[in-house]
Amino acid sequence: MPETIPARARLIPKGNHYAVFEVGQVFEHHWGRTINAGDNSLFTTLTLSYNPLYFNVEYAKAHGHPGIVVNPLLVFNTVFGLTVEDLSEGGGPFLGVDAMTHHRVVYEGDTVSARSTVKDKRISEKMKGFGIVTWHTEGFNQRNELVIDFHRTNLVRIRT
């Protein structure tokens, strides 16, 4: 009888663990992501963001923009999402974001990329088997202009 797929399956650990991170270490996150009109429209609608800059081209142009502005929360979520594979995919609760600044407007069709630098790490006193790591993440557009930055903190597993 042939071996079944579940019997052949093997767990492949994802993400990095605490020992991998060193203060000052820089992660250039892969690929980037082009934010298109559908992304912006759907996100804006689902989050009930009724600012016309995010869905009305004539309104955006009347307020000095060349086109529709991408919802800043979508910009944040996209840049944050680009970092997950390198920083937190190995598991561990998200502890928060602070010191977020939106530096430039992102427009539909712009491509954002991300870079993160390890700012701090320490062993958790309350959660056995975890450390606490803080990164400074920067998001850039296709012209390498800074569009957003923030600090993010996660619990990270000590071992994989």
Image (cartoon, helix red, strand yellow):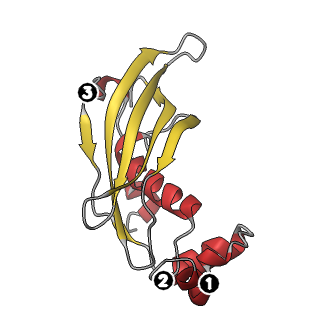
Q: Amino acid at mark 2?
A: Gly
Name the residue tied to disc 1: 59
Q: Secondary structure at mark 2?
A: loop
Left or right: 147 in relation to 155: left
Q: Is residue 10 visible?
A: no
Name the residue tied to disc 3: 24
Q: Is residue 52 visible?
A: yes
Of the residues under marks 1 and 3, which one precedes in the sequence?
Answer: 3
Q: Residue 121 location, x and y as percent? A: 40, 20
- Residue at horizontal 62 percent and vertical 84 percent from the top: 59
Name the residue tied to disc 2: 67
Of the residues under marks 1 and 2, which one precedes in the sequence?
Answer: 1
Q: Amino acid at mark 3?
A: Gly
Of the residues under marks 2 and 3, which one precedes in the sequence?
Answer: 3
Q: Secondary structure at mark 3?
A: loop
Q: Amino acid at mark 1?
A: Tyr
- Residue at horizontal 39 percent and vertical 79 percent from the top: 109
**Mark 2 nearby-residue class (10 Å; few <14, some 14–19, many ≥20):** many
Left or right: 133 in relation to 124: left
Real-space CA distance between mark 2 and mark 3, rounded to the nearest whole angstrom: 38 Å
Q: Residue 134 location, x and y as percent? A: 44, 29
In the image shown, does 57 or 30 lie closer to the viewer?
A: 57
